[in-house]
Amino acid sequence: MRFRARVRVMPRPSILDPQGQAVAHALGELGFAGVAGVRVGRAVELELEAASADAARAGALQMCERLLANPVTEDFALDDVQREP
Amino acid sequence: MKVAVVRFPGSNCDADALAAAAASGADAAYVWHRSTDLGGADVVILPGGFSYGDYLRPGAIARFSPVMRAVAAHAAAGRPVLGICNGFQILCEAQLLPGALVRNGGLSFVCRPVCLRVETDTTPFTARYRIGQELRMPVAHGDGRYVADEATLDRLEREDRVVFRYVGGNPNGAMRDIAGITNEGRNVVGLMPHPERAAEALLGSGDGAAVFALAAAAAVA
């Protein structure tokens, strides 16, 4: 069975995010009021062959820990795992 | 004295590193990243560049290249390993050095000479320097801001494992002005600046040459 997993990788709140600051600044310049903060991370979509959704999720978690996120600077969230038609 | 300069797809300071090692009298050779051995090298250099296009994170993919098993074994045996710029990023990703290198505080790619202070002479690559000696050499990176948690930073300082610090201006916002560090065994050193680009006076500075005084490196190890 084929599944699609969506992973979000974000810089740790304790790590200065200059990209987020630059985007926040640009939004202000464009006239968008009320932007209190911006953080920029990364989204990864995985297409996985697995026997079950649980197996796909477990595999995706291992991939996050091993490669997709740096445990020193980033947090990750496995947003959802969906069966592909 | 045999030196291996590892080439990853996207390495671009490999020739400079090889030339600097050869100029110090070493028998220096390239090792391709698919290789599973280091050709009997005494010292390993991971050069600068943009391995795998810096995709995902700088060094994140290169750390899984086959050669990295041999590099890890070389390091575990207490033998000298030097990572320059992207090589430093790879060593951190491989957890052979603590912490990480993230996007420069000012976001822009910084390519200019900086001033460094030698903080310790008890590593194979700084044995020829004096503590407190100031060196001029270039940086050239977009992701050179050294970060680690406070406990790790405290420990690095307590154990005299900060090897180089930026002085007279921090080009990337690195925590505690850290430009280079060493591991617990003091045989693995990583730094963001490029000593191989300051290895002879003709290049504008010869201050980096002593990093490649590798006979000293092998003797210390």
Image (cartoon, helix red, strand yellow):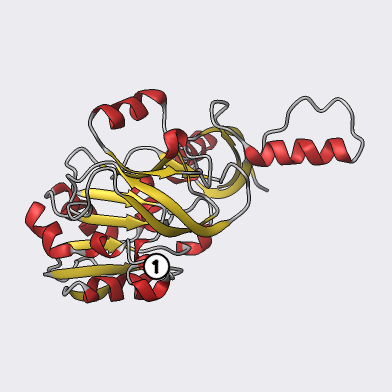
Which residue does the image show at 42% across and 68% down from the upper left?
B11
The answer to whether B188 is drawn above or below residue B194 in the figure is: above
Q: Position of residue A50 (x, y in %)?
A: 49, 45
Q: Position of residue B125 (x, y in %)?
A: 22, 54
Compared across the picture, whether B154 is left or right of B42 comes to right
The answer to whether A16 is drawn above or below residue B85 in the figure is: above
Compared across the picture, whether B194 is left or right of B215 comes to right
Q: Amino acid at mark 1?
A: Arg
Which residue does the image show at 24% across and 34% down from the upper left?
B160
Residue B106 lies in what quarter of the image? top right
Give the secondary structure at mark 1: helix
| Nearer to us in this view, B137 or B92 | B137
Question: Label 1 lies in what chain?
Answer: B
| Residue denoted by label 1 | B197
Which residue does the image show at 59% across and 56% down from the upper left?
B109
Compared across the picture, whether B91 is left or right of B57 comes to left
The answer to whether B207 is drawn above or below residue A70 in the figure is: below
Which residue does the image show at 44% across and 38% down from the upper left?
B177
Compared across the picture, whether B93 is left or right of B56 comes to left
